[in-house]
Amino acid sequence: MTTATQLAAQSAAPQSRNDDPAAAPEGGVVQVEYADGGWVTVCRRSDLLPGRGVAVLLPEGRQAAVFLTRAGEIHVIGNRDPFTGAYVLSRGLLGSAGGAPFVASPLLKQRFSLTDGRCLDDPEQSVPVHPCRVV
Amino acid sequence: MAATDITGSDKRTDGTPARTLVLIGHGMVGQRFLEELAARGVTEDTRVVVLCEEPRPAYDRVQLTSYFSGTSPEELSMVEGDFLARHGIELHLDDPAVAVDREARTVTSRQGRVIRYDTLVLATGSYPFVPPVPGKDSPGCFVYRTIEDLKAIEDWAGRATTGVVVGGGLLGLEAAGALNKMGLTTHIVEFQPRLMAIQVDEGGGSALRRTIESMGLLVHTGVGGQEISTAEDGTVRRIHLSDGSSIDTDMVIFSAGVRPRDQLARECGLAVGERGGIMVDEQCRTSDPDVFAIGECAKTVDGMVYGLVAPGYDMAAVAADAIAAAGTTGAGATFTGADTSTKLKLLGVDVASFGDAHGTAEDCLDVVYSDSRAGVYKKLVMAKDGTLLGGVLVGDAESYGLLRPLTGSVPPVAPEQLVLPAGLSPAPALGPAALPDEAVICNCHNVTKGAIRAAVTDHQCTSVPEVKTCTKAGSGCGSCVKVLGQLVNAELEAQGITVDKGLCGCFGHTRQELYEIILALRLNTFEQVLDGHGRQEARGGDGCEICKPAVASIFASLAPAIGADGYVLDDAQAALQDTNDHFLANMQRNGSYSVVPRIPGGEITPEKLIVIGEVARDFGLYTKITGGQRIDLFGARVDQLPQIWARLVEAGFESGHAYGKALRTVKSCVGSTWCRYGVQDSVRMAIDLELRYRGLRSPHKLKSAVSGCARECAEAQGKDFGVIATASGWNLYVCGNGGATPRHADLLAQDLSDAELIRLIDRFLMFYIRTADRLERTSVWLERLEGGLDHLKDVVVHDSLGICEELEALMAAHVANYRDEWAETINDPEKLGRFVSFVNAPGTPDPTVRFVPERDQMKPDLTILSGPEIPVRTLEGSSR
Ligand code: SRM
Ligand SMILES: Cc1cc2nc3c(=O)[nH]c(=O)nc-3n(C[C@H](O)[C@H](O)[C@H](O)COP(=O)(O)OP(=O)(O)OC[C@H]3O[C@@H](n4cnc5c(N)ncnc54)[C@H](O)[C@@H]3O)c2cc1C
Ligand code: SF4
Ligand code: FES
């Protein structure tokens, strides 16, 4: 199962976080799939604020942005804003249009779909989407 | 690659023999012609082959100059998505036609293609005319027509300090503007006695000249270039002019007009005009009925060769009609002539001309308004019976959208009212309602007022964008969009359809309505507001980047009155804040932040200055004195912000709210304490005002200033609220603005005591916060406010709405509840947890935020952002 989105509410019972067994009392930890098919824990579910994002480091050193929507969905996309090259998407504002979540870049405000990474304002641009889950 | 004889008798996929149409030239008109063909279904049973000389498909030549301001060649493209593939059109780039054999009905291309045609269309455009002056081919000489030309100019200009443009017409001025922007000393040499001689008359030309000269360009009229001499390496060195003078220069751009590209036509024996241009009939057919010519290469039945894109588009439609109707007897569209009205922005100056701009008709009369100080010149040409024949507008072409469609009719108001500036006009200015249905509103796409109204009434369009898609109006040069919007809204209202004035896709209410709802119902969570008052389809959703900060700002302005926490990072509100408010700092282009401590009134002790210096030194920040009488520290990583602020708060600094739509600074002059002219203590008043209104969230930023006497050293009349000392008190000015559209503030009240002054400002600000739109500065708000300044005076000075007590109470609550956001944040460990580069590696700084030295300080290293992703691990621990 590698859908980009995983409802936290439907997630498996809380399991312990790999590196810190005591850290998952509030509904688990967020894991992101990386290049070779492995899963890596990036943060606690409780680190996330609905409507905002955080930046995380993936094992090979890339940056990703993790978002929590109001409905409790978690989405992970690349942190780099392709328009400016700056690593800032995690600090953009989350919104939804027609029920689909997006983030608006904090620099020049272009919007990116959180489900498929496409830029809603310029079909030429997109950002990577990382499969994720809460365990 | 030499492909030969791709014959015209090959088979479609279904086996039927295809007709072949060959188009030579894929410019603006060529592309439009292909779209017109496809729209008529011709591409379904005809093989279409396009030979294109340039290395890229058709692009927007009209917008060519925007290449210099960063628009990429891809963005200029006119070919949408898979248009060509979808219609099976074969496009050969970089492969111009070199010969046409009308007997054999073939076209030969440079790469060796030989294509048989049934129908041939020439859309070869024009070439720039270069006067035959010695030295014209030396390196450093350019023309201005294609993206390749601009690339070459850009390359050369990088090494040049001076440039000369030969030709002061439309394109010459565009080219000169581009050189000027690149920092070159720029000369314009024009043979005619005035600039833009084709479009404007003498008065207009001189208004234009004054404005252009005031930008630092050097204009030489009535002289021509005679010879170009070169340096030892053969590159351009100097241009000699016809009056014996010369200009030392590193480059020359020739922009001395264009000539139709009719050589292919000449060589294959088609009729061409005496002074060039392929002769065509009303259907754009050449002297050979199977060959058409359209666009700038054609000489039409009225004897004209049109150098504008709109007539070319008309020809494209006419030719497509004729080709689609081949074999049938239906009478298609015809081209008999076109309107050459134009509105342009040249070097930031609006220039428009329409109809009989030069007043060539017999017995015509001029109505002229001219203000050389403001660089405004307007002339209308009227017939004796009062019919508007044409006109010229320079410096203020606002009324073009209305005047052009009125041409040919007797305007409903006196002509002098049509040229007077809005403020001076004795009667209400003419609205689009006055236009007849036949009036052409959009010149580019030839759309009449009647067609726009029909889009609303018959085609059920309910918004401007829908009308644009339905009629194409407004999708060309854009000069008609304003009038279009007014017409569509008027028509919608006449239909009883409420025009959608909603804040965004989530809310059908305006900001002002949301303010009233939030205050009346004491709402203080975004969910309450969205789920209870949002559009049906948006309820339960996440909101968007427009409404979230707007609602957050209303909450913050009203915090005590609605039972919300005034602290913007309070949990319920934190998620709504714009990025800058969320980190209480301004994000810079590389993702780092700037820090601006408040320095009320611009007054600061040496001790505090030293602290700022020490903090900047210790964190390696770039420092700059701002335009707002304070100091900006740039280049902080998000994880450094709390440490920086801990130091600043300890030294007694507070947030300067440079990141918020909130009060910025109250600038001061030194005032009566020191200055020999000062009549009041302007510094004390500035500090009092800044401390009173600090942290006040509003629809847009608020700026203020206090001057100690009428000499106005603090520039108070350029501020949202400005105060100028008088012998007996203070004068209050409101709704001034610097920035992009400067506006002088209006006097609201005179000779106020301290207390009266503050009471009036309290009321003014709260009334603005209550009624303004999102991101609407006070200056724009006042222009929109019904009844204008008089109404504002009635409300805040005479309390005509009976709301002043409430406005004052709201301000009093704000003042009483103010807390410094940074002091609060550094004392809240949970909030501080958010100030990290990475949640899963709190100690690791973001490796992409790096700096390089410049002028003894540092600046962002942008090269690091243009490459591929940078692994972080290897850099761990490299933080300073
Ligand atoms: C730092 C400063 C330039 C400087 O180095 O001097 C500056 C910097 C910015 N200005 Fe400004 N403005 C600065 C003084 C001004 C002034 C001069 C003044 O205030 O006396 C003006 C003209 C006066 C006015 O506003 O009426 C000014 C007119 C603007 C405008 C145009 C506003 C308008 O109504 O047209 C914008 C854009 C906007 O707000 O939409 C803008 C926007 C900006 C932004 C916020 C652009 C952005 O979004 O990144 C810049 C962010 C600064 C930062 O990151 O810290 N800035 N800006 C000045 C900070 C003053 C301060 O201490 O707070
Ligand atoms: C800087 C600039 C600003 C302008 N601003 C405006 C404006 O504001 N308003 C306005 O109305 N107009 C403006 N124009 C004019 C407008 O661009 C032209 O009217 C329009 O491009 C004409 O279209 P066209 O297809 O006839 O010619 P073009 O767009 O020039 O296209 C002709 C194409 O045919 C190609 N070609 C020529 N010979 C051959 C051959 N033998 N084989 C294959 N291909 C060939 C050429 O390379 C070219 O690509 C501007 C022009 C410039 C350069
Ligand atoms: S405004 Fe008047 S008081 Fe203030 S510094 Fe200027 S001259 Fe002096
Ligand atoms: S007049 Fe140019 S887009 Fe309408």
Image (cartoon, helix red, strand yellow):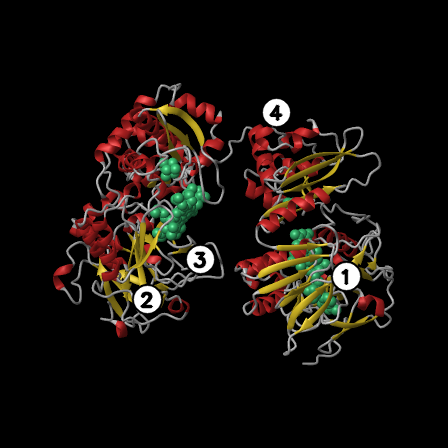
Q: Circles 3 and 4: CB distance less than 8 Å?
A: no
Q: Circles 1 and 3: CB distance less than 8 Å?
A: no
Could you say which is closer to the camera, residue B84 or residue B166?
A: B166
The lab-note entry on whether marks 4 and 1 share a chain reads: yes
Residue B221: x and y in percent read 71, 54
* Residue B648 left/right relative to B3: left
Q: Chain of mark 1?
A: B
Residue type at mark 4? Answer: Pro
Reading the image, the residue beneath label 4 is: B426
Q: Marks 2 and 1, how far apart in space?
A: 52 Å
Residue type at mark 2? Answer: Arg
Q: Marks 1 and 3, how far apart in space?
A: 43 Å
Reading the image, the residue beneath label 2 is: B850
* Residue B751 left/right relative to B466: left
Q: Chain of mark 2?
A: B
Could you say which is closer to the camera, residue B10 or residue B274?
A: B274
Residue, x 19% and y 53% (percent of image)?
B647
Residue A6: x and y in percent read 30, 57
Q: Earlier in the sequence, mark 2 or mark 4?
A: 4
Q: Is residue A6 above or below residue B107?
A: above
Reading the image, the residue beneath label 1 is: B259
Q: Which is in the foreground here, disc 4 or disc 1?
A: 4
Could you say which is closer to the camera, residue B57 or residue B684?
A: B684
